[in-house]
Image (cartoon, helix red, strand yellow):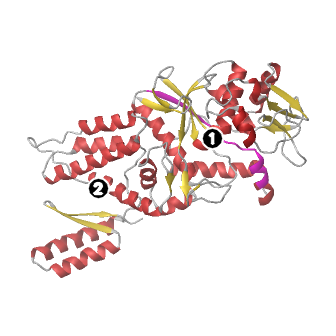
Amino acid sequence: MKVFNTLTGQKEDFHPRSGVVSMYVCGITAYDESHIGHAMTYIIFDVIKRYLGFKGYKVKHVQNFTDIDDKIIDRANQSGLPPAELAIKYTDQYFANMDALNVERADVYPRATEEIPKVIEIIQGLLAKGYAYESEGSVYFRVRNFSDYGKLSRRNLAEMIPKASSYEEKKEYPLDFALWKASKPGEPFWESPWGKGRPGWHIECSAMVLKYLGDSIDIHGGGQDLVFPHHENEIAQSESFTEVVPFARYWLHNGLMQQDKQKMSKSTGNLVSIKDALGRFSSDAIRLFILSSHYRNPLTYSEEALEASERGAERLRWALTHQANADEGVAILNAEPFEQKFVEAIDDDFNTAQAIAVLFELTREINRSAEQGANITEAQLTLLKLGGILGLTLKEKTQPTPDAEAFISLLASTRDDLRQNQQWQLADKIRSGLADLGVTLEDTHQGTRWRYNKR
């Protein structure tokens, strides 16, 4: 099994420290609705977690919530809600969205405001070692004191300085970053040895990793937009505090969702909410859309692509509706070669696009074998199992009532009779009318089968 490590810039054999893989994934800043770009990140890492479980590993998964920062304070002031209440609102909404997308829950969801003691402990240690300094009630990290600064993003200080924005005069150096921010009038605050304030953004993740997973972890993940400065700063402050290298063995970063050639983000308003996407498409369709591209590549949001993914999800579901022939002596469809190809694809840096292609190959073979009267039971179970690794439920989003099902079956049977009597016009009228209602008919050697596609 190989994974692409951002830290080394190449694929590496995956060798965790033990049978329990420690994985930290950066979570949302809870100040607005989660969008489809968030779905991309968390679906990808959900598949990584599921696959590690399939390979026999246990995974301890931690994912944070940033529940206090400038954006939350600004939005709270605009909305009239207290910052804590605003953060809870969007955290709860995030959970509802992830549940609807069939994303498995992490083991721990720490929140920045609940980790203040650990944050203060780390800052005190960095101050004692000369990696940090206090200035006017705030505390900053000295990037020049960490010789490896820039190793994740492959930048050096000389290149970064011209790009640094105007900085506060109380900082010693433009690239120094805040570990603790002195509170402004009217802002939420916590007591600290340096006065009233709150954690900087980067320090909260280090505190959570060290507290819940230890000084060195196997996987640290997030979007490519976090490589610099967020993850770069995490490495600097964590390795300076613990003196343990590496802070994370494998850095995995997914590509970003785009719309209209721009990164999808809350700050630009260029986004599609998860709620809106789920209102139109099934979770299976959304997952197929995201996973049909390699996770490190950017992905452009497209309703046409999602509609195609919905049709693809329906093809996978359809293969599970065939009645298996369990008679003795009939051929049995062997799904082992498909599972082997699927595993080879995911083993190669989580190549879900290739793995999905294997699922459709298996689906075609199930359909063909069913037509020939073969036993397809094991193959259908394999399709369910492999789809489950990708988080696909392969369940219909909606179903007609039992009475409606009986009526559809009656119409399909009537159409068969009309076809046998060569009354093609009436038979086609029934097919067309059912199609308008979201029902697709398929003529097979075993008779007419139907499926309900209404979303």
293 left or right of 193 in image: left
**Which of the pair 397/361 is nearer the observer?**
361
Q: Amino acid at mark 2?
A: Trp
Q: Can you give x and y, in whole percent of width and height, for residue 141 in the image? A: 78, 30
Would residue 131 be visible to someone looking at this image? yes
Residue 116 inside the magenta-drawn segment: no
What mark, if any, has residue 109 been given in the picture? none
How far is the residue under mark 1 from the one under mark 2? 40 Å
Whether residue 384 sits left or right of residue 109 in the image: it is: left
Front residue of 192 and 124: 124
Look at the image and tell me in which quarter the N terminus lies: top left
Q: Which residue is mark 2?
A: 318
Q: Quadrant of residue 342?
A: top left
Instruction: Report the span colored magenta.
Output: 57-74
Magenta stretch holds residue 62: yes
Q: Identify the residue at image location x=24%, y=79%.
A: 429
Q: Position of residue 241 (x, y in %)?
A: 72, 22
Nearer the observer: mark 1 or 2; the answer is 1
- Position of residue 160 measured from the top left corner of the image (x, y, whole percent): 71, 37
